[in-house]
Amino acid sequence: MPSDSEADAVVLDAVTHTYGDVTAVGPVSLNVPAGEFLVLVGASGCGKSTLLRLIAGFEQPTAGSVLAAGVRPVPGRGAGLVFQQPRLFPWRTVGGNVALALRYAGQPYGRERVEGLLARVGLHDVAHRRTWQISGGQQQRVAIARALAVDNPLLLLDEPFAALDALTRERLQEDLRRVSAETGRTCVFVTHSVDEAVFLGSRVVVLTPRPGRVALDLPIELPRTGIDPDELRGLPAFAAARAQVGAAVRHPEGVLA
Amino acid sequence: MSTSLETRPVTATPGATTALAPPRRKRRILLRLVALVVLYALWEITARTMNNPTFIPSPGAVWHQLIVTSSVHDGVRGYSGHLLIEHLGVSLRRILIGSVIGVVGGLVLGLVMGTVTWIRVVTEPVVTFIRALPPLAYFSLFIIWFGIDETPKLWLLSIAALPPVAVATASAVLGAPTGLVEASRALGANKWQAVRDVVLPHALPEIFTGVRIAVGVAYSSVVAAETINGVPGIGGMVRDAQRYSQTDVVVLGLFAIGLSGLLIDALLQVAEKRLIPWRGRA
């Protein structure tokens, strides 16, 4: 084990995961330093979601080891999780969903705290609404607010914007980029979109098709704060990174060799 | 005996009435009113042409009995010494106590059945067996065990009301959505919190359907329970009236049971809408 593992938010050491006789992932070794925004990209079925579930503690590796904040991950401890579907609880109001997360964390869950968290993800005046009365994009924002409610050092996101329309997706990407910079949390984000990966990540890892392995590990040298999203997308460095990641996604074997 | 078997007021009408457009709704109400008037007219005509009040009492005779059984006449209080409303009240009280015991028992049993596999394997055939029995079939056993007073009646209603709730709860708990349970675990819920905050609320709509069926079963069983030492009680009243061929009182009893049953089911539906606004949204 590397000696600096204590400083890393997530350490994957030769991790393999199999379902029956199908090897979904691995072996994969990755160190994610605290504060990094890591994006895992790959075609569907490359095991990137499995990797995220391993980090969340919902799955155990068949071989190798997973450490989050230096310990074996347990669901609900140390990491907030956002899924592809919002997975809100319809028997609670929007605010009630956020309050529940605060309650589990043993924090005060008064109205002010709830409204503050919702405001952080760009939602105002929705706390009293029912979950089905707000749009899909808003629902996903609530899911993010819920995951942020606990002061976890780690935020895991599994294709959270895949089911949204293009315009809403861009807005949420911009807001997530801002929120992650503001909170300084370590993020691991799974997507199959090259654009999304380069826009969000401070580091992009491309996985090969099943079994998923690291095909490309690329630091993204783009400013994290103080830049307009459109301006960012227009930078030459953005286009270059996108081209490199795109090529790796399309021809992962070539990069490996 | 025949009277008690014919009086099955509410075998819970499942499926809440969907909201209809106002004009269609108005037409439906109008149609129902017309049907009621026609039925009433048919009854009146039949009663008059047959001219045999023991076979078919006229609406007027039934109405007269309503007044007689609801007041004190010549020192006689209502029917068999109790007013109609008192007979009905005693029956409703039995239904209430029996349903509450049955629902609470069914809820606990269903929760355990839904979460502990070996208990489900052991109890499922028993619950299904009891559910298949007509309540009257095991009533004789309760009479032998508990005598003829209040105890066997309450046992009967409780046991009859339990299986629908237990089965509904167990199946709803078993069908808990893994995605939402996982979401709660990801937020830091422990097992118990996941049950309380996700599994149970998700199961509520199905449980409530079970409760409505249970109350319906208790309702139809109370008349059977009151065939033995059932006065005061609406079933006892009907049974006595049948013995003395007071057909108008029998018919009056049927109306009392049927209408109060409809009312209770309507109340349950309103409660359901208020308590479970997310029904059909989860």
Image (cartoon, grey):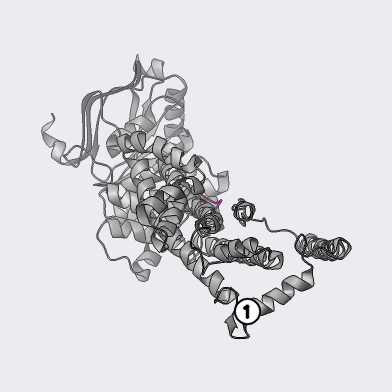
Q: Is the magenta stretch mostly helix, strand or loop?
A: loop
Question: In this rendering, does residue A228 appear at all?
Answer: no
Question: In this rendering, does residue B89 appear at all?
Answer: yes
A24 w.r.t. B88: above or below: above
Q: What stretch is highlighted in magenta?
A: B278-282
> For residue A18, what is the image quadrant?
top left
Q: Which of B48 and B208 is in front in this view?
A: B48
Under mark 1, the amino acid is: Ser
Q: Residue at x 47, y 68 (%)?
A: B93
Q: Which residue is drawn at 54% across and 77% down?
A: B81
Residue A179 drawn in magenta = no
Label 1 marks a residue whose chain is: B
Numbered-mark total: 1
Secondary structure type for disc 1 = loop
Q: Which residue is drawn at 48% across and 47% down?
A: B164
Q: Measured from the top left, where is residue A4 in percent x and y?
A: 13, 36
Q: Measured from the top left, where is residue B141 in percent x and y?
A: 41, 47
| Left or right side of B60 for A3 | left
The residue carrying mark 1 is B70
| Left or right side of A63 for B8 | right
Q: Measured from the top left, where is residue B150 in percent x and y?
A: 41, 63
Q: Measured from the top left, where is residue B53 in percent x and y?
A: 78, 65
| Left or right side of A219 for A235 | right
Q: Nearer the viewer, residue B184 or B279?
A: B279
